[in-house]
Amino acid sequence: MAVAAGLLAGTVATSAIGWASPAGATINKPNTIGCAGHADIPEKNGKTVTIDATQSKAHVPRSAAGPVTYSGSVTTVTHDHHGYVAVVLGPFNIKFYTWGVSQNSSNKLSDSGTRKYPSEMKNVPPGEYRVKGGHFSPQGSCTGEMTLIVDGSPLSNPAGIVALVGTIVFALLFLLSLFGKPVLGLFGGLLLGLFLVVDLMLWKVTYPTTVLLFALPIVGLVLGVALGLWGPIGGSAP
């Protein structure tokens, strides 16, 4: 039976690359079934990215030199278990991998092996992400979370280029509010705030927390309207 060897393993493999454990994550208490896990990702420069269940942050490459080696274990045999891995965007959890109910008729406590590193990772924009997940059964459960940093330049991916261009465009629109244009200030400030959230994530400053996701657009909106109504450079017409 193969489920997630951990949050990282599930994240970078987008598949079950281990068993029963959020590896590469900070496992939350109470860890009632003793989840543990480990994953090794070989890089093309000859180095190996090693992820353990005790880590709260991990760097991962967009491509690997070979398969991921994983191991995962629990201290309590679980049956009829299921789980998920999700990307956290503010208050929203976007589940991108789940595993269904498994009976575990062989009463396995651990599993290990290798899984192919997904080619889809090369299309993931470099940046800082927050992922979380859990493994649940009638016998107990464990949950975990981690900060995942996908290495590389933000401008090496179309998403990074679009985010940069969008930030510049809406920053200029926001500045037009100074000419007594509160409507332009409203839309410019709102969208500038949203693009800044994306920029902070892609440039690996921080992942989009709930506060950032809502605060920056609201602050931009309010400032844009206020500057437009003030109109220090032009009139007060919208």
Image: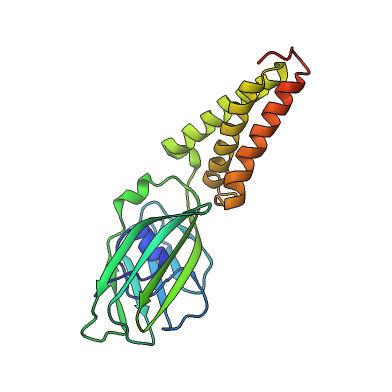
Number of callouts: 0
For residue 64, what is the image quadrant?
bottom left
From where the camera sits, is residue 57 visible?
yes
Residue 107 screen position, x and y as percent: 26, 86
Pick the residue in front: 91 or 134.
91
Q: Is residue 221 left or right of residue 154?
A: right
Which residue is at 29% across, 66% downward?
99
Pick the residue in front: 71 or 222.
222
Q: Is residue 124 left or right of residue 82?
A: right
Q: Quadrant of the C terminus?
A: top right
Residue 123 screen position, x and y as percent: 36, 44
Which residue is at 36% across, 64% downward?
84
Q: Is residue 167 left or right of residue 112?
A: right
For residue 196, what is the image quadrant?
top right
Residue at the limit of the structure toward the left, as seen here:
105
As drawn, 96 above or below 137: above
Residue 171 screen position, x and y as percent: 62, 27
- Look at the image and name its color scheme: rainbow
Q: Quadrant of the N terminus?
A: bottom left
Which residue is at 65% across, 34% downward?
220
Residue 3 screen position, x and y as percent: 30, 70
From where the camera sits, is residue 172 visible?
no
As drawn, 39 above or below 172: below
Pick the residue in front: 41 or 102.
102
Which residue is at 63% across, 39% downward?
218
As drawn, 122 above or below 72: above
Q: Is residue 185 left or right of residue 14?
A: right
As drawn, 58 above or below 70: above
